[in-house]
Image: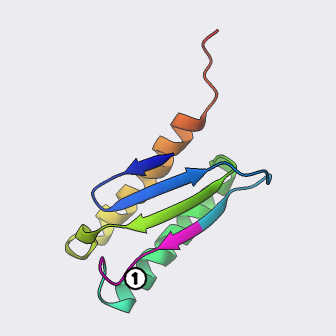
C-alpha cells in the first residue's frame, strides 16, 4: 500500500513477523543538508519507537519528497503523524458484517 502526502510517501507491505519494521529513504535531492536529513530520520525513528505497538505488522518505508527543504519541522511531524494514522485506519479490520 502506498500513501502519499506532499512531503513524504509511505509504502507498507505486510510481513510474517509479529512486529513492524522501518525503512527510510531521504535523498539528497529532497534535503541537501545532511543535518536536515538526519533530523528528519530521527523524527521518524522516534515516532516509530513511541507508536510501534499501534502500527500494523509490516514493513514501513518512508520516502522524502522534494518539498521537504521548504517546509518547517512542524509540517514534517504533522506529515509523519498523518501518514501513520491513515495507515492504521486502512489496516484496521472492518467491523461491518
Dot 1: element? helix
Q: Position of residue 33 (x, y in %)?
A: 32, 90
Relative to 88, does residue 9 appear above or below in the rendering?
A: below
Q: Residue at x 50, y 55 (%)?
A: 11
Give above or below for 66 relative to 19: below
- The answer to whether residue 59 is left or right of residue 33 is right
Question: In percent of the image, x 61 and y 65: which residue is there?
Answer: 22
Asked if residue 90 is positioned above or below residue 11 in the image, the reply reads above
The part of the image, by quadrant, that contains residue 81 is bottom left
Q: Is residue 25 in the magenta section?
A: yes
Q: Nearer the viewer, residue 22 or 49?
A: 22
Outermost left residue: 70
Viewer can see residue 49: no
Q: Residue at x 48, y 76 (%)?
A: 41
Where residue 29 sits in the image (x, y, percent)?
A: 30, 80
Asked if the magenta segment contains residue 66, the reply would be no
Q: From the image, which quarter does the C terminus lie in?
A: top right
Per the image, the residue denoted by label 1 is 37
18 lies left or right of 74: right
Image location of residue 10, percent across then percent down: 46, 56
Which residue is at the far top? Answer: 97
What is the quadrant of residue 21 in the picture? bottom right
Measured as percent of width and height from the top left, residue 61 is found at 53, 62
Left or right: residue 24 versus residue 56 is left
Q: What color scheme is it?
A: rainbow
Secondary structure, magenta segment, majority class: loop
Magenta part of the protein: which range? 23-30
Amino acid at each position: 500500500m502506498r500513501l502519499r502526502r506532499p512531503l513524504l510517501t509511505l509504502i507498507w507491505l505486510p510481513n510474517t513477523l509479529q512486529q513492524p519494521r522501518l525503512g527510510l529513504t531521504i535523498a539528497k535531492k529532497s534535503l541537501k543538508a545532511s543535518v536536515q536529513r538526519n533530523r528528519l530520520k530521527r523524527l521518524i525513528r522516534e515516532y516509530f519507537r513511541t507508536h510501534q505497538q499501534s502500527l500494523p505488522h509490516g514493513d514501513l518505508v518512508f520516502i522524502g519528497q522534494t518539498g521537504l527543504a521548504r517546509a518547517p519541522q512542524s509540517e514534517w511531524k504533522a506529515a509523519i503523524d498523518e501518514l501513520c494514522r491513515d495507515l492504521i485506519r486502512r489496516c484496521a479490520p472492518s467491523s461491518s458484517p
